[in-house]
Amino acid sequence: MLAALVVAAWAGGPAVARELRVCADPNNLPFSDKAGEGYENKLVELVARDLDAKVTYVWWAQRRGFLRNTILAGKCDLVPGLPVGVEMLRSTAPALYRSSYVFVTRPDEPPISSLDDPRLRELKIGVQMIGDDGYNTPPAHALARRGVIDNVRGYGVFGDYSEPHPPSRVVDAVARGEVDVALVWGPLAGYFAARATPPLRVTKISPPFDGPRLPMAFDISMAVRRDDVELRGEVAAALRRHRAEVDAILAEYDIPRLDQPSQAAAER
């Protein structure tokens, strides 16, 4: 592509804008949406400006089959947010941030930080659920391992896609009093808890591991196809150059972080 641009410039023809093809969900705030209001949208724009590229999106609901139907099908080249170490792809380094599952409670209730808190046997608990085939979120498995089942209500990670940002229902359930506490992935919880009336309390699950095989915390990065070494290097370098701006975007969206705790999260 670089050679073609040089030839076009030398020949006096118009330079062809570079294209950054991004795979994203059009209805998944705070991560991404079609209006460009998610923090992953903002991070992608930051990278694109650095690379002097134009962003084009391939929109696909982030459900099972998302990677297979987008980046692995060659329809787009960059996923703006995935756990580090997804086998089919290559993550950028260093990670964008490290976050964890959190407890979400109303501000007038005592905070909870441990999965072994005895109150969890009595309170109405909301958890994010992926399916009925045993593949579920770490908090759902952790509660089941402790025998905390009958007072747990599941809220689909995918939700009703006809509604705006469907995964937020589990946070809404705490605000409405439908449940007393919810165990939610940090970025989703932090964003919607801060915008509830009144704002809800977000407390990181501690410790960030429930036994050796059940982590509650994950490093999140951008990702490319495994053979796209050049793009991986360019994106990683752009993110390193704009680290302060990356951190500011994450703070604006109230992302609870283990690598750099935000002041806003600490105050709630």
Image: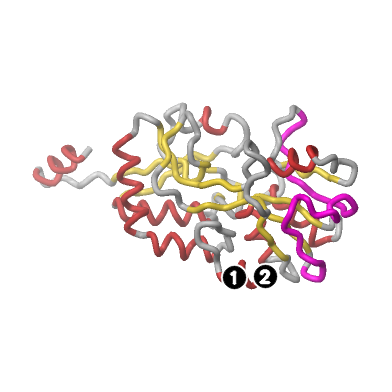
Q: Nearer the viewer, residue 199 or 181?
A: 181
Q: Residue at x 64, y 72 (%)?
A: 267
The quadrant in which the N terminus is found is top left
Q: Is residue 152 above or below residue 266?
A: above
Relative height, residue 241 to residue 24 (above, below):
below
Using residue 32 as the reference point, say whether residue 176 is left or right of it: right
**Viewer-proximal residue, 246 or 212?**
212
Query: Measuring 77% from the left and 30% from the top, which residue is drawn there?
Result: 132
Kindly indicate whether the residue at mark 2 contacts the one at mark 1 (C-beta within 8 angstroms).
Answer: yes
Image colouring? secondary structure
Residue extending farthest front? 212
Residue on which disc 1 sits? 264
Neighbours of disc 2 within 10 Å: few (<14), some (14-19), many (20+): few
In percent of the image, x 74 and y 33: which residue is there?
A: 131
Q: Is residue 151 visible?
A: yes
Choose top left, top right, bottom left or bottom right for residue 154.
top right
- Numbered tag placed on residue 39 in the rendering: none
Residue 138: x and y in percent read 68, 41
Where does the image place residue 69, in percent across and percent down from the top left? 52, 29
Nearer the observer, 197 or 58: 197
According to the picture, the residue beneath numbered tag 2 turns out to be 268
- Tag count in the figure? 2
Instruction: Check residue 82 for magenta coloring.
Output: no
Residue type at mark 1 is Ala
- Report the Cα–Cα distance between label 1 and label 2: 7 Å
Place of residue 20 in the rendered image (x, y in percent of width and height, measured from the top left): 37, 43
Measuring 9% from the left and 43% from the top, which residue is drawn there? Answer: 11
Quarter occupied by residue 106: bottom right
State which region is magenta: 107-132
Foreground residue among 60 and 262: 262
Q: Position of residue 115 (x, y in %)?
A: 75, 50
Vertical side of 79 occupied by 193: above or below: below
